[in-house]
């Protein structure tokens, strides 16, 4: 497996706890580029969170199928995957949780429908944005210090999401542009 990065509590100045039989999750996410060269970003207004498109791998899905499904749900677009960037690991020790994300670079083939957000995403005020890479990096970077708790998530967890996606976008910028 090619790892492009990782995050632990120590990256946020917190004491790292030893993981003890942690809950584990695999996810697929990545950078989706439209015909105008802009990338898809999910903005959750309630928590002031900006993040990449993607989510958990369900049951017996493979990572590519999961990424295509998440993309269709969150953007309404079908995509062509151009490259596998690598994996990203998060060890969220305060929650005894470990996540491995499979990361892709993809381009939009067709806008098939409007995003079909989950109830949670709707209640968090989710909206799809298409931003230049530099603008996306700036939004993600700036939102980390202004995150807000919601009934679905807390700042501790959301900081991992935001920092992970910032790091992924910086990797994309350095290796793909």
Image (tube, helix red, strand yellow):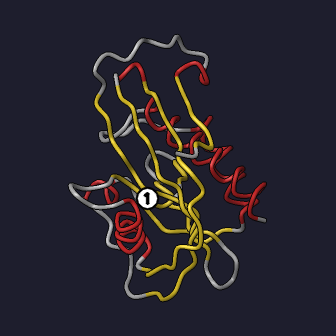
Q: Is residue 123 above or below residue 16?
A: below
Decide which of 168, 86 is in the foreground and name it.
86
Decide which of 45, 174 is in the foreground and name it.
174
Q: For the view shown, which residue lies furthest in the front direction? A: 1
22 lies left or right of 18: left
* Residue 124 percent location from the top left of the image: 37, 53
Q: Is residue 103 above or below residue 90?
A: below
Quadrant containing the C terminus is bottom right
* Residue 29 percent location from the top left of the image: 48, 57
Q: How many marks?
A: 1
Q: Residue at horizontal 62%, vertical 44%?
A: 4
Q: Which residue is mark 1?
A: 54
147 lies left or right of 54: right
* Residue 5 percent location from the top left of the image: 61, 39
Decide which of 99, 128 is in the foreground and name it.
99
Quadrant of residue 25 within the rendered picture: top left
Decide which of 44, 66 is in the foreground and name it.
66
* Residue 15 percent location from the top left of the image: 52, 10
Quadrant of residue 154 within the rendered picture: top left
Describe the element under mark 1 as helix, strand or loop: strand
Q: Is residue 135 above or below residue 162?
A: below
Q: Residue at horizontal 32%, vertical 66%?
A: 117
Q: Residue at horizontal 59%, vertical 38%?
A: 146
Quadrant of residue 71 within the rendered picture: bottom left
Q: Residue at horizontal 41%, vertical 35%?
A: 149
Category of crowding for the residue at label 1, using alpha-carbon neighbours closer than 10 angstroms: few (below 14), some (14–19), many (at least 20): many
């Amino acid at each position: 497996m090619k790892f492009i990065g990782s995050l632990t509590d120590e990256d946020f100045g917190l004491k790292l706890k030893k993981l003890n039989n942690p809950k584990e999750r695999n996810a697929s996410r990545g950078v989706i580029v439209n015909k105008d060269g802009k990338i898809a970003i999910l903005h959750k207004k309630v928590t002031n969170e900006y993040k990449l498109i993607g989510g958990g791998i369900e049951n017996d899905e493979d990572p590519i199928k999961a990424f295509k499904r998440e993309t269709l749900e969150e953007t309404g677009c079908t995509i062509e995957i151009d490259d596998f960037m690598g994996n990203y690991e998060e060890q969220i020790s305060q929650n005894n949780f470990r996540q491995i994300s499979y990361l892709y670079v993809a381009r939009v083939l067709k806008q098939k429908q409007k995003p079909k957000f989950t109830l949670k995403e709707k209640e968090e005020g989710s909206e799809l944005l298409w931003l230049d890479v530099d603008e996306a990096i700036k939004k993600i970077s700036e939102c980390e210090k202004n995150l807000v708790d919601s009934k679905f998530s807390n700042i501790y967890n959301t900081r991992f999401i935001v920092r992970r996606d910032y790091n992924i976008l910086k990797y994309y910028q350095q290796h793909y542009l």
